[in-house]
């Protein structure tokens, strides 16, 4: 062993000895722990003895009543010792009978319990499930919200184990213009107290909750500071469970940052190390959200979502984080129990709260938030049926995009009138260097003033609208359970035939709107394919791919929102109409050809374009020998 290795071994030994010395418990700590264990042992022994005495008295002296009070007093004393050991100063608050009562508003009915000062159930009044039943936001069996805190002796206590006192009516209704304050209290044996105060508003979907610790010195301090633990399970509320599950997850926002979420496909969990502004257990069209705009503390904070793999629930949710005190040394936060309605969520002015509704990222979300949502709301105010609203929205979008559509058709017409000359060049250089053929085609474009990419630019501007619609319709609660023609729910699939079996990747039904959308897409493709330029050698057959795409759409959209399929179907019909009108009554291909020939003569001596020069430079770098002009 060399000198360095020996010194390393010595240092390791010294570190271990030092660590054991400095971390070893003191005599006082050892005695305190021993006393605590002895106390528990004595209590358990007293309980065992009292139960033994009770059994003996029941067998040997069944007729002597005077022994019963003595036995009961021993049992009660033992129970008190056990409760005190477990709950500390809140031992007396851990005993009681659970009582429930209802607070109703025009928005929802809340069921409260004195055990844990908790909300047991929430029923929304303006909505029904697809089966016509009341909408319960969560399953009571899996719902749990508790606050775990350390009382003054260091014992961890959970609100779910405490019975809170307060004066409440069995049923109370809060008028739309009114509010109600509920005040619970769990009292300790030495003047300590934990108050839980709810404020319910008659005209809102949110309520306020305050946690007020009195005489609890450790509530907001130390490693065992107060923290909430929340778990829940969402019911299947919509028509198609599998589609509904794909839009359910835990959404959240970190302080001052963008909205984020756990996966919507399967199980996921996330450990959070920054203050959390809000956490939402999101269903497809409804959410339960806890909001603290100053931020929950990220002490062992964790979010979790699981797929229960049953036919009753959508997802299992869980979240935990520490409470942060206000200037008054209380914890104050809000709950939102309501629909995923953009206008309602946006009205709360909470950072990113409206993005519980996933309208898409980037420019696609902007199109929906700042244009489509408002146009849809305007049309909705006219009291049209939602089928007509979608039709009017489609026409409006087509009119707005019509200048781009016109430019696209003009570009296609130019390419079409040049097609014979391009085919002539292809035939001329059939067996020649491909670069020479490409150079001559580019020269033709330059001389005629035709840009082969001009038709792509209008399409790029239309893509955000197309994708925005793809995100908008499935996420719009306005379409939920709204019928149109044969569709009974525009937010889910329509069916004209329920199959007795399931086709893989397709489903167990036939969606007519999806079928019509695919047929109209094929028709539009057939009309448009004649305008495509000559296919280049070595490139995939784009026309074949364009016909295969609608077939894929037939499988992909069969379980999607019928409102979305209906929109694409009407958009295709309008596009076909636009194409026919522009081609037959607006664009004159003879005049376009004359203009092209005129440009060709005028640009005969014109030099190469910058694009062509760059193309030739790239070819030279790859070793091509370019022909001289």
Image: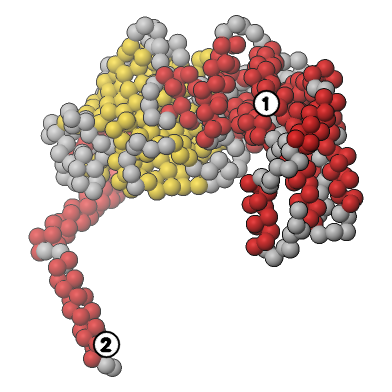
- Are discs 2 and 1 less than 8 Å apart at CB? no
**Residue located at (50% from left, 47% from top):** 268
Q: Position of residue 417 (x, y in %)?
A: 84, 33
Label 2 sits on a secondary structure element that is: helix
* Whether residue 494 is situated above or below residue 174 in the rendered picture: below
In the image, residue 258 sits, relative to residue 564, either above or below, namely below
In the image, 261 versus 418, the foreground residue is 418
The x and y percentages for residue 468 are 60, 29
Q: How far apart are the alpha carbons under marks 2 and 1?
A: 76 Å
Q: Identify the residue under disc 2.
A: 5
Q: Residue at the location (34% across, 37% down)?
A: 255
Left or right: where does residue 123 sit relative to residue 32?
right
Q: Is residue 98 above or below residue 436?
A: above
Q: Quadrant of the N terminus?
A: bottom left
Q: Residues within 10 Å of mark 2 (few under 14, many from 20)?
A: few
Residue closest to the eye, 378 or 627:
627
What residue is shown with label 1? 404
Task: Give the residue displayed 82% in from the left and 28% down from the top.
Answer: 594
> Picture coordinates of residue 597 (x, y %)?
81, 33
Mark earlier in primary sequence (2, 1)? 2
Evaluate whether residue 521 shows in this view: no
How busy is the neighbourhood of tag 1: few (under 14 within 10 Å), some, or many (20 plus)? some
Whether residue 255 is visible: yes
Per the image, label 1 sits on a secondary structure element best described as helix
Q: Nearer the viewer, residue 8 or 549?
A: 549
Q: Nearer the viewer, mark 2 or mark 1?
A: 1
Image location of residue 582, percent across then percent down = 79, 21
Q: Is residue 149 left or right of residue 534?
A: left
Q: How many marks?
A: 2
Front position in the image: 308 or 328? 328
Q: Which picture quadrant has residue 566?
A: top right
């Amino acid at each position: 062993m060399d000198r360095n290795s020996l010194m390393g071994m010595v240092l390791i030994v010294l570190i271990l000895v030092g660590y054991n010395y400095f971390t070893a418990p003191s005599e006082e700590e050892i005695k305190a722990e021993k006393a605590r264990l002895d106390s528990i042992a004595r209590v358990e022994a007293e309980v065992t003895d009292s139960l033994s005495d009770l059994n003996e008295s029941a067998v040997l002296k069944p007729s002597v009543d005077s022994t019963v009070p003595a036995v009961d007093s021993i049992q009660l004393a033992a129970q008190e010792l056990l409760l005190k050991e477990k709950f500390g100063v809140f031992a007396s608050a851990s005993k009681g009978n659970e009582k429930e009562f209802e607070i109703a508003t025009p928005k929802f009915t809340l069921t409260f319990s004195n055990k844990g000062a908790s909300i047991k159930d929430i029923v929304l009044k303006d909505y029904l499930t697809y089966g016509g039943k009341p909408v319960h936001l969560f399953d009571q069996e899996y719902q749990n919200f508790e606050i775990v805190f350390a009382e003054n002796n260091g014992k961890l206590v959970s609100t779910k184990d405490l019975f809170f006192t307060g004066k409440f009516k069995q049923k109370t209704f809060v008028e739309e213009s009114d509010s109600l304050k509920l005040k619970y209290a769990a009292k300790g044996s030495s003047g300590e107290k934990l108050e839980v105060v709810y404020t319910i508003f008659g005209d809102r979907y949110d309520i306020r909750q305050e946690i007020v610790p009195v005489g609890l010195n450790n509530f907001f301090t130390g490693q065992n500071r107060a923290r909430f633990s929340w778990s829940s399970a969402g019911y299947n509320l919509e028509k198609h469970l599998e589609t509904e599950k794909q839009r359910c997850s835990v959404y959240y926002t970190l302080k001052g940052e963008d909205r984020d979420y756990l996966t919507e496909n399967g199980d996921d969990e996330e450990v959070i190390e920054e203050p959390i502004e809000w956490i939402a257990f999101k269903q497809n069209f409804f959410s339960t959200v806890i909001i603290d705009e100053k931020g929950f503390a990220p002490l062992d904070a964790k979010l979790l979502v699981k797929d229960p793999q049953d036919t009753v629930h959508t997802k299992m949710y869980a979240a935990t984080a520490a409470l942060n005190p206000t200037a008054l040394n209380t914890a104050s936060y809000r709950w939102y129990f309501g629909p995923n309605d953009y206008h309602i969520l946006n009205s709360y002015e909470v950072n990113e709260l409206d993005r519980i509704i996933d309208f898409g990222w980037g420019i696609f979300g902007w199109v929906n938030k700042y244009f489509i949502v408002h146009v849809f709301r305007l049309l909705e105010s006219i009291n049209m049926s939602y089928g007509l609203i979608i039709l009017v929205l489609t026409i409006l979008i087509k009119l707005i995009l019509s200048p781009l559509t016109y430019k696209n058709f003009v570009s296609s017409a130019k390419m079409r009138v040049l097609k014979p000359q391009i085919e002539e060049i292809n035939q001329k250089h059939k067996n020649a260097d491909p670069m020479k053929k490409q150079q001559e085609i580019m020269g033709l474009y330059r001389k005629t003033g035709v840009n082969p990419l001009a038709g792509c630019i209008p399409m790029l501007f239309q893509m955000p609208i197309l994708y925005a619609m793809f995100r908008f319709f499935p996420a719009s609660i306005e379409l939920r359970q709204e019928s149109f023609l044969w569709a009974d729910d525009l937010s889910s699939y329509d069916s004209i035939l329920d199959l007795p079996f399931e086709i893989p990747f397709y489903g167990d039904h036939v969606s007519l709107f999806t079928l019509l959308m695919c047929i109209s897409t094929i028709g539009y493709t057939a009309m448009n394919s004649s305008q495509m330029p000559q296919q280049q050698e070595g490139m995939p057959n784009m026309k074949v791919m364009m016909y295969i795409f609608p077939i894929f759409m037939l499988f992909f959209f069969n379980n999607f929102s019928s409102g979305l399929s209906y929109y694409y179907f009407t958009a295709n019909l309008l596009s076909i109409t636009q194409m026919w009108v522009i081609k037959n009554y607006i664009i004159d291909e003879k005049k376009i050809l004359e203009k092209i020939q005129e440009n060709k003569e005028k640009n005969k001596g014109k030099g190469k374009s910058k694009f062509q020069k760059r193309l030739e430079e790239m070819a030279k770098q790859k070793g091509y020998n370019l022909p001289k002009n």
